[in-house]
Amino acid sequence: MTASSSFFRSSVGKKFIVAITGVVLIGFVVGHLLGNLQIFLGQDWVNSYAEHLRQLGPVLWIIRAFLLLNVLLHIFYTISLALENRRARPVSYKRKEHVKATFASRSMALSGLIVLAFILYHLAHFTARVTDPRFLLLKADPLNRYDVYSMMVYGFQNYFVSGFYVLGMFLLALHLSHGTSSFFQSLGLNDKKLTPRLATGGRIFAWLIFIGYSSIPVAVLLHLVKPAQQL
């Protein structure tokens, strides 16, 4: 067994992989949010953003494959670490450990799996467009681009879709609220003064992400954002 393979099989190595893949995914979450929030700026902004992504061609699918690989590695090693911790924890100390641990930290593996299910549905819904027949009825916008703006609005007009979306974002926020501070712990950048600040910063960041993403379906359901074309 090589030194590198031994490292990635160790707890430190696994935490390192979880941290690095987490940073990559956080970067995507922030970037994706900034793109989605353009729905409040109108049809042209969203459709232009979507068209720029489409013009990436094969590169876009390479990016998607890279992100999916990061998701799978992140979940796999998070579950692996959770199982290690469970095996190493004496039964007599279980109740004591749960008092110290937050719900977010104890549900990291479960929330990660549910978020993965949400991502797969989200791709089927808005990328593959196979869950809502109305998407196929949308005409091109005045610049002959697919009307992603109206597609988003019609998609979120469904209460079940919007509810699942908000639930997915809530679980993502729980995941992030613990994961952002854990990242610094994994790199050894932690002490008594820094720990509470990182925890607070992580929670603020996570719930800002939740508010940002959730504001879109809420605005659609309140009819503050309306489709550019009627079906």
Image: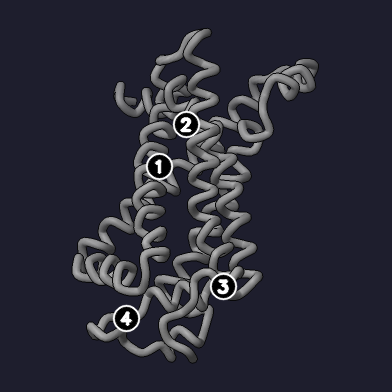
The residue that appears at 26% across and 86% down in the rendered structure is 142
In the picture, measured across the screen, residue 116 lies left or right of residue 95, that is left
Q: Earlier in the sequence, mark 3 or mark 4?
A: 4
Closer to us: 152 or 45:
45
* Pointer 1 local density, CA inside 10 Å: few below 14, some 14–19, many at least 20: some
The residue that appears at 26% across and 70% down in the rendered structure is 48
Distance from label 1 to label 3 (Cα)?
Answer: 30 Å
Q: Which residue is mark 3?
A: 223
Distance from label 3 to label 4 (Cα)?
Answer: 22 Å
Q: Which is in the foreground here, disc 4 or disc 1?
A: 4
- Amino acid type of the residue tagged 1 in the rendering: Ile
Q: Decide: marks 4, 2 in contact (CB < 8 A)?
A: no
- Amino acid type of the residue tagged 3 in the rendering: His
- Amino acid type of the residue tagged 2 in the rendering: Thr
Q: Earlier in the sequence, mark 4 or mark 1?
A: 1
**Residue 57, percent across and down?**
20, 69
Q: Earlier in the sequence, mark 1 or mark 3?
A: 1
Q: Which residue is mark 2?
A: 180
Q: Which residue is mark 4?
A: 146
**Residue 120, percent across and down?**
49, 63
Q: Decide: marks 2, 1 in contact (CB < 8 A)?
A: yes
Mark carried by residue 26: 1
Mark carried by residue 174: none
Q: Decide: marks 4, 1 in contact (CB < 8 A)?
A: no
